[in-house]
Amino acid sequence: MVSFSKYELARLIGARALQLSYGAPPLVEVKPGSTAIDVAKAELEMGVIPLVVLRQA
């Protein structure tokens, strides 16, 4: 697994949570009462988050 910096993690979770809040379909099972941030974290943990981190060399 790729290790992300705390800044990359915050950006990934925030960007995906925004997508979810605007109606993007979740890629994991959503539990009742969970927030968009909870779903984004679950997607990241399962490795199915549809975002890519590009790093400059």
Image (cartoon, helix red, strand yellow):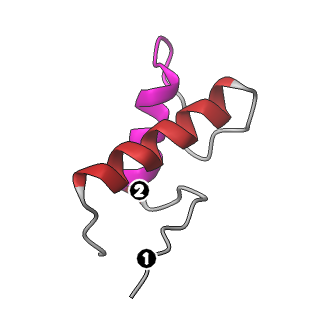
Disc on the earlier residue, 1 or 2? 2
> Element under label 1?
loop
Position of 29 relative to 3 (above/below): above
Q: Is residue 1 left or right of residue 16?
A: left
Indicate the amino acid at tag 1.
Arg
Magenta residues span: 31-45
Position in image of residue 10 (x %, y %)? 35, 43
Q: Quadrant of the N terminus?
A: bottom left
Position in image of residue 56 (x %, y %)? 43, 81
Q: In this view, does 55 lie to the left or right of 2?
A: right
Q: Residues within 10 Å of mark 1 (few under 14, many from 20)?
A: few
As measured in the structure, the alpha-carbon distance from the residue carrying label 1 to the one carrying label 2 is 22 Å
State the predominant SS element of the stretch in magenta: helix
Q: Is residue 42 visible?
A: no
Q: Report the number of numbered marks.
A: 2
Is residue 49 within the magenta segment? no
* Residue in the picture at 24% in, 60% down: 5
Residue under label 1: 55
Position of 44 relative to 57 (above/below): above
Q: Is residue 33 visible?
A: yes
* Residue in the picture at 48% in, 23% down: 31
Residue under label 2: 46
- State the residue lying farthest toward the front: 57
